[in-house]
Image: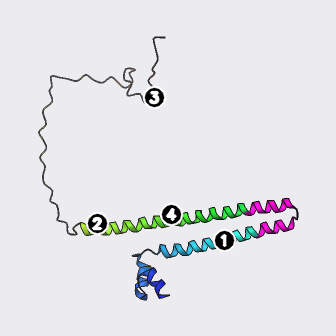
Amino acid sequence: MQRTIRQVFGTTRPRDIWLNLFTFDQLLTRPIIHIVYWCGLGLLFIGALGWAGIMVGTGIKDASIMGWLLSFGLLVVGFLGFMIAVLAWRSVCELYMAVMNIAEDLRYLRQFQEKLTPQSFAPVTPQAVTPPPVAAPDTAAVAEPAPPSGSKDNILEDPFFRPRFERKDL
């Protein structure tokens, strides 16, 4: 029992175990997901045995050869369904483990990044920046005024404008 506790929590001291439980320093997903996985497999196995019992009972109840063939066919389908369900359950548990491992890896990366960055930051004093000189506008060259927005010439101002590309050579 101590070996199992040591594998899960890394120690057998009760103080460290409670500290790990309440501080979330170590994720407990691996042992918990193993328990959930085996419980799910047990439920799938019980369901498969129930399905097999139903099919054998149906075969016994219907004494004809067609009843036995139908029961055998559904028994094979039930076995294949059980195998597919086991694979699906395994992949769901592995997906959950992968997501939790990503979270744990990110935690380690953050800790590593904190070790690389210095903890004491020197205050940055702002420096006055002189704006670049602006050239005076040339009063002789006056730009043409834009056409008024109500004009038909300004198609960019109309939000409902759709250009029509028509062939005029036809």
Cα gap from disc 1 to disc 3, whole angstroms: 65 Å
Q: What's the magenta region?
A: 53-75
> Which numbered disc, 2 or 1, marks the residue closer to the eye?
1
**Total tally of numbered discs in the picture:** 4
Q: Earlier in the sequence, mark 2 or mark 3?
A: 2
Q: Earlier in the sequence, mark 4 or mark 1?
A: 1
Q: Residue drawn at (54%, 63%), measured in percent from left and top?
A: 91
| Quarter of the view holding residue 24 | bottom left
Q: Earlier in the sequence, mark 2 or mark 1?
A: 1
Cα gap from disc 4 to disc 3, whole angstroms: 49 Å
> Which numbered disc, 1 or 3, marks the residue closer to the eye?
1
Cα gap from disc 4 to disc 1, whole angstroms: 22 Å
Q: Is disc 4 surrounded by few (<14), some (14 to 19) or many (20+) residues within 10 Å?
A: few
Magenta stretch, main secondary structure class: helix
- The residue that disc 4 covers is 95
Q: Amino acid at mark 1?
A: Phe
Q: Earlier in the sequence, mark 1 or mark 3?
A: 1
